Amino acid sequence: MSYQEADSNPGAMARFTPGKDFSGGKYMLYSYFPRTAESTESGTFIIHTGKTRIEKTINFKEVNILGQTTSTWVALGEYAFEKGRSKPYVEITSDAKGILAANAILWVPVSDQN
């Protein structure tokens, strides 16, 4: 899935999984956030590491977008993912009225950031 919108439908969900060449390890996660006048105020991200389920709420009103754009990558944090029977994923759900665009999740190996 590359893009999905939920308009005023709390509980709507989009799920992203890493590609088939994914290997376990530590990754920094980012979500692409395109802001519009109709954007929701907050969203919940469920990060399943293959072993643990972590819930993180992002207040999109606090996201600072710089420059001549209306979009930015929002850091979700660093997580240790496992490859095994329970495949890792990230789910995005809408918490409030408005449009939540589930555009993309970026999985960056921590080893690439050193």
Image (spheres, grey):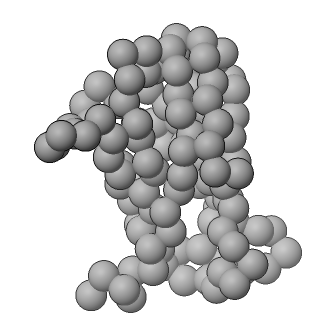
Residue closest to the far right:
85
In the rendered picture of this protein, how many numbered marks are placed on residues? Answer: 0
Residue placed most toward the observer, 113 or 5: 5
Q: Is residue 4 left or right of residue 65?
A: right
Let me know if residue 81 appears in the view. yes
Q: Is residue 88 left or right of residue 8?
A: right
Residue 16, image x, y percentages = 66, 54
Against 98, residue 56 (above or below) is: below
Location of residue 36 (image quadrant): top left
Q: Is residue 61 left or right of residue 29?
A: left
- Which corner quadrant holds the C terminus? bottom left
Against 89, residue 26 (above or below) is: below
Residue 46, image x, y percentages = 60, 46
> Looking at the image, which residue is at 66% across and 68% down?
18
Residue closest to the far front:
68
Let me know if residue 50 appears in the view. no
> Looking at the image, which residue is at 40% across and 36% down?
34
Residue 52, image x, y percentages = 65, 61
Against 96, residue 61 (above or below) is: below
Against 82, residue 101 (above or below) is: above
Residue placed most toward the observer, 22 or 85: 22
Residue 56, image x, y percentages = 48, 43
> Looking at the image, which residue is at 37% across and 86% down?
112
Location of residue 103 (image quadrant): top right
Location of residue 45 (image quadrant): top right
Residue closest to the far left:
67
